[in-house]
């Protein structure tokens, strides 16, 4: 077992480790294995490789067949996890423990690895492992070379290396076939096709022939293409005299689609003829690249001019923290202009290179028989001797805007094409750049059936509705089915435990606050009315022998706010069971009340909501009265208080007294409206008086008000002339008829919005103390001298019947 995994911890709890629908699995980093994780994710997106591995059959004693068979079995189960598991990430530890190097030793992790060499190690392990096990179905769709295996034909091609030299004025040509895997490219050319062209030819100055040195020319032509073309970019370099490697993140561009035909042996003669016509274009491109290099780097070719200018500008802008001088400011401005000019020239050169490159592509337009699509980009982030690896991988099953994903160990996310390009192409001040590119034959990344290749949707109704799922063997399906079920059960239990702990913690805080409020209310009861209505839990506490109901209410209310379900909801059964287990130590009530207790709780809850609803309405009514909006306050009073089916309570009793004063104000408003001959206002005021009057009709106050109205009628009826009948009818309809539904409907539309605003009102907020306090203060304001004066005046009228309207007017 690799020693580096000894201290690795699980990055996510089982409750967090649930795979998102439609997302691939990540891979856990088990000790500097990020570069291997990136490769494995790339392999998984190559369908024929997955198929070959998944179709391998193993006997029960497959472990006796050696490490290579164990490796393929571990890879098979890892791929099965990536297809079937509902976990967010898989653990590749079993795979790592069976991976052998070229000498048969277990691969040790801890240092950075060469990606090309490591890739070939994995391919070798797969090939040997498949030879050690039975294959029930071969890969018949992909052409294999005679001497190669099925997996080798995916990643290994054959080059024809042609060496030519002159000896005694005679030209000698030697050709040999050589297998190749990853193609190593320099980045100096700045783009893939130019770098590939440079790598396909070489001049050997000291080629030995019969103990003599001569100059030889080497050409490399592809004889057989692999299904996957891998390009390894040489971004590491050394400076003479310094053993420490450095890394270049210089810009290197590569297309989404390539056609390797121009490098193939079968087209050699035709390509050479085309190269003659393309020679001038290549020369122009090389000249432009030299110009660009002189703009980018100093004479040693390593130090960036733009970076140097930036450092100088940063220094000048601060001058070690001092205020910048005028000379520095002028120099800074000149450097800024120089930087912009250099960047513009570089951009112009890039555009020109791209234009000429397109002309070159047009020359080779007839050589496009083999289409390869960019499938994966492996990224290195950091310095040459340290850093982190991750991969961008394209999913051709997805819509175009969702095709790219970033595979960063356990984290897999969707990324845009722009982000992929910006990160992978590299630029001078970046720490990230592509170091390996994978291109795959177009037909390989498209399904061979009507099914999509992969849905990444395990555990759903569609989990087997893709081609990858058809590769699964029954033992793997059963294994991950059981794992998923256990995970879901454990995940549910852990989440339930976390919920219960949070509920109990929150409950204790809430109930402690309730107790403190209740104690405060008890002290202030004599001074303030309805203080027990701050919230329902406190209200229930004020009722003898109902403390357990108060606790139940607080718990039930918390459940509703958190889950939008009550404790009586059948779907809360499991949570209630967990709560019951934990509640004994908290002194809480049973979460399932007996019927009598539940009925009592429901009755008290209904009483509380009625009381508090009235209190809210009363608050608004009194607020409107204080602001002299008497008509609106009366409308709320009529709709929400007078017409309620509930019996009288103390809140209504207070409002009843207050509206004695309002009734007198209304009479004065009627007096003014009559004097101004405003019939519509008179009718409205009379209707308002009518709504209040019948609450006082059996009392002296009501009779006194009627006397005042009659006096108003006598005083003003003669001045109405043509509108006399209308005025009399208004008084008759408004004052002499009882309150009816039609009268209420008229006012309803103006109060409806206010009523609806109370539908979602939270009756259990501890801040309602402010509402209660405001209600008490309003009551004190309106039950002061004004009310006393109004009542005394009406009583005086009722007893003497002699007061005149002039006297009434002068009184107010």
Image (spheres, rainbow, N blue to C red):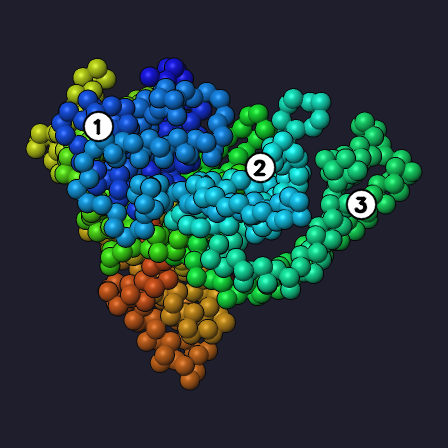
**From the viewer's perspective, is residue 357 above or below residue 192?**
below
Query: Can the viewer see residue 146?
Result: yes
Dot 2, crowdedness within 10 Å: few (<14), some or many (≥20)? some
The picture quadrant where one finds residue 250 is top right
Say which residue appears at 24% left-offset and 59% top-offset: 450
Q: Give the structural element (helix, strand or loop) at label 3.
A: helix
Look at mark 2 in the image and give the residue it sits on: 234
Per the model, the C-alpha gap separating discs 2 and 3 is 33 Å
Say which residue appears at 79% left-offset and 38% top-offset: 299
In front: 446, or 181?
181
Q: Residue 267, position in %: x, y?
A: 49, 59
Dot 3, crowdedness within 10 Å: few (<14), some or many (≥20)? some
The picture quadrant where one finds residue 84 is top left
Q: Are marks 2 and 3 in contact (CB under 8 Å)?
A: no
Question: Residue 490, labelled with which disc?
Answer: 1
Look at mark 3 in the image and give the residue it sits on: 336
Say which residue appears at 59% left-offset and 63% top-offset: 274
Q: Quadrant of the N terminus?
A: top left
Furthest-front residue in view?
168
In front: 732, or 114?
114
- Of circles 1 and 2, the one toward us is 2
Furthest-right residue in view?
327
Q: Give the structural element (helix, strand or loop) at label 1.
A: helix
Say which residue appears at 44% left-offset and 53% top-offset: 373
Query: Can the viewer see residue 715?
Result: no
Dot 1, crowdedness within 10 Å: few (<14), some or many (≥20)? some
Question: Is residue 262 rendered to the left or right of residue 787?
Answer: right
Question: Residue 655, labelled with which disc?
Answer: none
């Amino acid at each position: 077992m690799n020693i580096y995994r000894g201290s690795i911890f699980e990055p996510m709890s089982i409750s967090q480790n649930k795979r998102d629908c439609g997302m691939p699995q990540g891979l856990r980093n088990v000790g500097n294995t990020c570069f291997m994780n990136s490769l494995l994710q790339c392999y998984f997106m190559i369908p024929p490789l997955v198929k070959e591995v998944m179709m391998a059959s193993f006997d029960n004693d497959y472990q006796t067949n050696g490490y290579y068979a164990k490796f393929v079995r571990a890879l098979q189960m890892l791929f099965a996890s990536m297809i079937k598991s509902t976990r967010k990430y898989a653990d590749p530890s079993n795979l790592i423990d069976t991976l052998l190097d070229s000498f048969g030793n277990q691969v040790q992790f801890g240092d950075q690895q060469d990606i090309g060499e490591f890739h070939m190690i994995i391919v070798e392990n797969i090939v040997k492992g498949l030879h050690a096990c039975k294959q029930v179905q071969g890969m018949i769709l992909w052409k294999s070379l005679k001497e190669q295996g099925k997996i080798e034909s995916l990643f290994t091609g054959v080059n024809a290396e042609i060496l030519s030299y002159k000896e005694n004025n005679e030209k000698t040509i030697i050709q040999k076939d050589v297998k190749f895997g990853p193609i190593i490219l320099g980045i100096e050319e700045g783009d893939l096709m130019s770098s590939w062209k440079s790598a396909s030819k070489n001049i050997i100055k000291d080629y030995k022939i019969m103990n003599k040195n001569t100059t030889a020319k080497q050409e490399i032509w592809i004889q057989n293409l692999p299904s996957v073309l891998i390009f390894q970019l040489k971004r590491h370099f050394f400076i003479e005299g310094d053993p420490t490697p450095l890394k270049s993140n210089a810009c290197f561009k590569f297309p989404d689609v390539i056609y390797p035909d121009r490098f193939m042996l079968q087209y050699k003669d035709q390509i050479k003829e085309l190269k003659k016509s393309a020679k001038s274009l290549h020369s122009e491109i090389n000249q432009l690249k030299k110009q660009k290099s002189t703009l980018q780097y100093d004479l040693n070719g390593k130090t960036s001019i733009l970076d140097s200018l930036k450092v100088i500008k940063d220094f000048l802008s601060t001058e070690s923290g001092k205020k910048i001088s005028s000379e520095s400011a002028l120099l800074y401005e000149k450097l800024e202009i120089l930087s912009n000019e250099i960047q513009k020239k570089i951009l112009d050169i890039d555009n020109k290179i791209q234009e000429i490159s397109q002309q070159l592509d047009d020359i080779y337009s007839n050589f496009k028989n083999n289409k390869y699509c960019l499938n994966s980009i492996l990224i290195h982030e950091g310095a040459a001797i340290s850093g982190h690896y991750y991969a961008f991988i394209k999913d051709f099953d997805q819509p175009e805007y969702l095709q790219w994903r970033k595979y960063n160990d356990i984290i897999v996310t969707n990324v845009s094409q722009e982000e992929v390009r910006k990160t992978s192409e590299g630029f001078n001040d970046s720490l990230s750049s592509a170091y390996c590119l994978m291109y795959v034959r177009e037909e390989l990344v498209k399904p061979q059936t009507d099914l999509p290749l992969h849905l990444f949707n395990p555990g759903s109704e569609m989990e087997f509705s893709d081609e990858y799922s058809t590769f699964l063997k029954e033992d793997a399906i059963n294994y991950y089915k059981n794992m998923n079920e256990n995970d879901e059960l454990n995940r549910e239990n852990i989440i339930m435990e976390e919920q219960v702990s949070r509920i109990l913690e929150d409950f204790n805080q809430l109930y402690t606050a309730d107790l403190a409020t209740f104690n405060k209310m008890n002290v202030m009861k004599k001074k303030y009315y309805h203080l027990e209505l701050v919230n329902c839990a406190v209200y229930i506490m004020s009722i003898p022998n109902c403390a357990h109901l108060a606790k139940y209410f607080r718990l039930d209310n918390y459940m509703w706010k958190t889950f939008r379900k009550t404790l009586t909801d059948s779907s809360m059964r499991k949570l209630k069971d967990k709560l019951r287990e934990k509640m004994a130590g908290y002194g809480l009530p049973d979460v399932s009340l007996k019927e009598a207790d539940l009925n009592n709780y429901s009755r008290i809850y209904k009483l509380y909501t009625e009381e508090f609803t009235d209190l809210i309405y009363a608050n608004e009514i009194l607020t409107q009265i204080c602001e002299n909006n008497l008509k609106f306050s009366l409308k709320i009073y009529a709709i929400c208080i007078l017409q309620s089916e509930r019996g009288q309570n103390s809140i209504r009793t207070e409002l009843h007294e207050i509206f004695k004063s309002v009734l007198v104000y209304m009479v004065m408003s009627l007096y003014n409206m009559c004097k101004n001959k405003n019939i519509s206002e008179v009718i409205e005021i009379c209707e308002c008086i009518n709504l209040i009057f019948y609450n006082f009709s059996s009392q002296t106050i009501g009779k006194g008000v009627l006397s005042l109205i009659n006096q108003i009628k006598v005083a003003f009826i003669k001045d109405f002339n043509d509108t006399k009948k209308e005025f009399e009818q208004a008084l008759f309809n408004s004052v002499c008829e009882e309150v009816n539904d039609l009268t209420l409907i008229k006012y309803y539309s103006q109060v409806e919005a206010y009523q609806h605003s109370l539908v979602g009102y939270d009756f259990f907020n501890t801040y309602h103390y402010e509402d209660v306090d405001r209600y008490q203060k309003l009551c004190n304001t309106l039950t002061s001298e004004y009310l006393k004066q109004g009542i005394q005046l009406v009583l005086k009228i009722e007893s003497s019947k002699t007061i005149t309207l002039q006297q009434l007017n002068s009184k107010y």
